[in-house]
Image: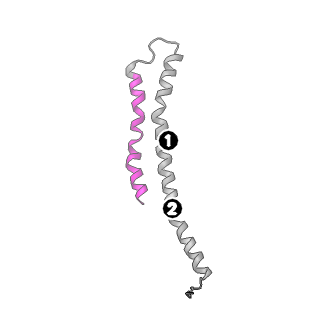
Amino acid sequence: MDTYNYKEVNIDEVQMRNNATWKPLMRQLFVFSGVASIYFVLGLSFGAPTVFIPQIRKESNFTNILTDDMASWLASVHGYSAIPWVLIIPIVSRC
């Protein structure tokens, strides 16, 4: 039968190794949660016109209060709110 030489494990060394592995993971989760939440919110804002434009057309008491041109502007103006975040998010996620 073979003999094995086992190395004694120091408890302090194991605890240091466990603490060191959690710190980068927590940083990555923090950065990911910020990036994911802003994309989630932007998705909600891009999807909102598909709901409120038909509601405005249905519930308006006046005829032609929401023209096709105005509906087009309402649907596209949310895209301009994402322009700063398209530039900021890659910079933040790189850190």
* Closest to the observer, 69 or 46: 46
Colour option used: one colour
Going 39% across and 25% down the picture, which residue do you hit? 72
- Kind of residue sitting beneath label 1: Val
The kind of secondary structure element at disc 1 is helix
Q: Residue furthest right?
A: 11
The residue where tag 1 is placed is 41
Residue 32 covered by magenta stretch: no
The kind of secondary structure element at disc 2 is helix
In the depicted structure, whether residue 38 falls above or below residue 50: below
Question: How far is the residue under mark 2 from the one under mark 1?
Answer: 21 Å
Q: Quadrant of residue 78?
A: top left
Going 60% across and 83% down the picture, which residue do you hit? 10
Residue 77 covered by magenta stretch: yes
* Start-end of magenta stretch: 70-95
- Kind of residue sitting beneath label 2: Arg
Going 51% across and 17% down the picture, which residue do you hit? 58
* Closest to the observer, 64 or 49: 49
**Which circle marks residue 27 in the picture?**
2
